[in-house]
Amino acid sequence: MTVKNSVLRTATAALICAASLALGAAPAHAETFDHDDATGDVRSVDDTGDDADDTQPEPLEDRADIVQLRVRHGIARLIMRVEVADLTRRDTAFLGPVFDIRTPQRRYTVDLTALNLRGGAVRDVSLFGPRGSVRCRGIFADLDFTGDVAMVSVPRRCIGSPRRVEIGAGMVQMLRDGERILADDAQRDGTIRNQLTLSAPIRSGPRRAA
């Protein structure tokens, strides 16, 4: 019995080793990117226009205040999340995290919108490319009001399976009074521009042999 068990263990170990070597020819690789954004850098936007000159600082405002951006660029998916100081439905008519994706070939935008937050939130996630809306299965998003996190997951095939991406993130929150729109850029302190600030390149794909 001891000899038999020993042979089985040896054979099993050999099979596992062979499988590992086969998979090791192109091991999966996912690169992550983390950025801590300054707190208290929210701006309020005059809803009569989107010019940066119309914004005012809101240093005491927690709503829409992004405190961290995290990106994971894996083999199959691009996952982008922002943590907000206070992701809340309070006095909110519209909530819209926005993610910009720049690939070597194109630039995409992912909008996650939530409306009618007084009751059940109506949520919609959309992907836009240079030619408008992009229809692609497998995109999903989540607003975690308990954890103060907004997340979007996009299959890489939906954006051309790029080897590298640069990511921008922002938050827009319209208050119920209809007079103030709160906004924050995850990678810019205290200023709002027409284009979100982009990260350094975040790579994905099999590791190259040394």
Image: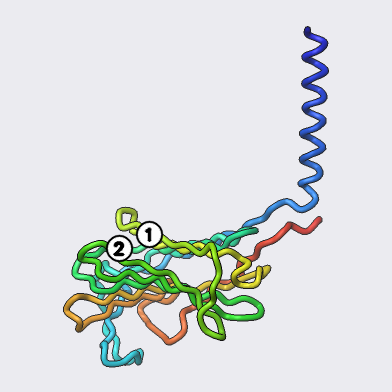
Q: Residues within 10 Å of mark 1 (few under 14, many from 20)?
A: some
Question: Which one is earlier in the sequence, the residue at label 2 or at label 1?
Answer: 2
Q: Label 2 to label 1, Cα distance in Å?
A: 7 Å
Q: Which mark is residue 149?
A: 1
> Which element type, helix, strand or loop, lies under badge 1?
strand
Residue under the point 46% across and 80% down:
196
Residue toward you, 39 or 142: 142
Residue toward you, 13 or 120: 120
Left or right of 107? Residue 58 is left
Up-down relation of residue 154 to residue 196 (above or below)? above
Amino acid type of disc 1? Val
Q: How many marks?
A: 2
Left or right of 151? Residue 56 is left
Residue that badge 2 annotates: 87
Amino acid type of disc 2? Leu
Residue furthest to the top in view is 1
Q: How is the image coloured?
A: rainbow
Q: Cβ–Cβ below 8 Å for labels 2 and 1? A: yes
